[in-house]
Image: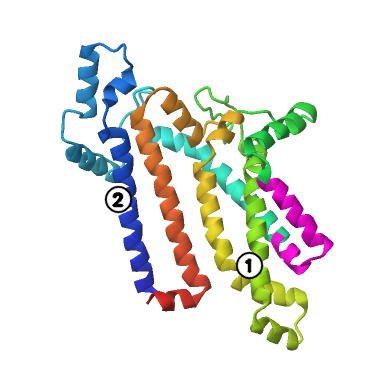
Amino acid sequence: MTLFILKRFATFIATLLAASALVFAVLDVLPGNAAELMLGESATPESLAALSAKLGLDQPPLTRYLGWLKGLAHGDMGTSLSYDTPVWELVQQRMAVTLPLALMAMALTTVLALAAGVYAASQHNKLGDVGVMTASQIGIAIPNFWFAILLILVFAVKLQWFSAGGFPGWTQDDGDGGDGGGGGGIWLGFKALVLPAVALAVVQAAILARITRSAVLDVLREDFVRTARAKGLSPRQVLWRHVLRNAFVPVLTLMGLQFANLLTGTVVIENVFSLPGLGRLVFQAIANRDLIVVRNVVLLLAAAVIVINFVVDVLYAAIDPRLRVGAA
């Protein structure tokens, strides 16, 4: 088990370094002047020279790259030019919205998908199976931004159960710098994320439900399932005690990818609901040509995907010992 984790950890470090090099190359090394891109074509030579010196563009690329990595190792992401605030502070503020939103969406996705997928497999080729597969196909086909607008029209405009957008904060006196107001609370903050979480979860739940159904059906055909039934176990006991655990490896793979996608792919939904999260921060940084923020946040999101994949690999070995024995 230890050797398995060490191998996966070495792959994790190598992938993280490769991602950082790619992000740096795309934003700092490729042809073009980053200072001119940030200031625009109307910038004066003096302002270009000052910004180039501030960004260290007069130094070799390798020196700048190593200096960037050294700063990241010490928690220094630099200072945003458009916000005049340390990037790490901006990230902390925005993660307070994006991370709970992704967790809520993932929890909703998991509950809906596992229940629907297992039910569809247990009703194979029956009306319940056809109904779940039809609903999942519709869920896959629906764009989440369109579904988000529909949720706003129904639950915010017509029924007025939820707000149409904005984020009140997690504490009574919390504000978010003008993006969503202040004076919220845990309940109001949770309530503000319900519709965005549903909009994000619909497509992901539809995909995961189909994968769960296929995985469960494959395991149901195994010999040990027939043996468990021959021992007198009820279909429900066989399904939940034996089948689901053995079918969970492909499901867990997709769940890891989906959580990474939910964490990094909230740009559209956060803009639809005017949520001050990481996705909206990246969108605003691109609009403001703030490459310092873009570079660090993109790497942070890439690192989140890599970390999640590493955790999924470790969970593989915990769920199925055959994987770690094969790797050894």
Pick the quarter of the image with the N terminus. bottom left
Q: Amino acid at mark 1?
A: Ala
Q: CA distance from mark 2 to mark 1?
A: 34 Å
Say which residue appears at 71% left-offset and 52% top-offset: 136
Mark 2 or mark 1: name the one nearer the start of the chain: 2
In the image, farthest residue toward the bottom: 231
Under tag 2, what secondary structure?
Answer: helix
Q: Is residue 278 above or below residue 48?
A: below
* 30 left or right, relative to 234: left
Q: Are marks 2 and 1 in contact (CB under 8 Å)?
A: no
* Quadrant position of residue 143: top right
Give the magenta range: 117-140
Q: Which residue is mark 2?
A: 17
Which residue is at a point 77% across and 79% down the rendered structure image? Answer: 234
- Please state if 235 lies on the left or on the right of 88 as rendered: right
User: Is residue 312 visible in this depiction of the protein?
Assistant: yes
Give the farthest residue toward the right.
Answer: 127
Q: Quadrant of residue 88?
A: top left
Find disc 1 in the rendering and name its residue: 215
Graded by Cα atoms within 10 Å as few (under 14), some (14 to 19) or many (20 or more), the crowding at tag 2 reads: some
| Residue 278 locus on image (x, y percent) | 48, 36
- Give the x, y percent position of residue 249: 55, 67
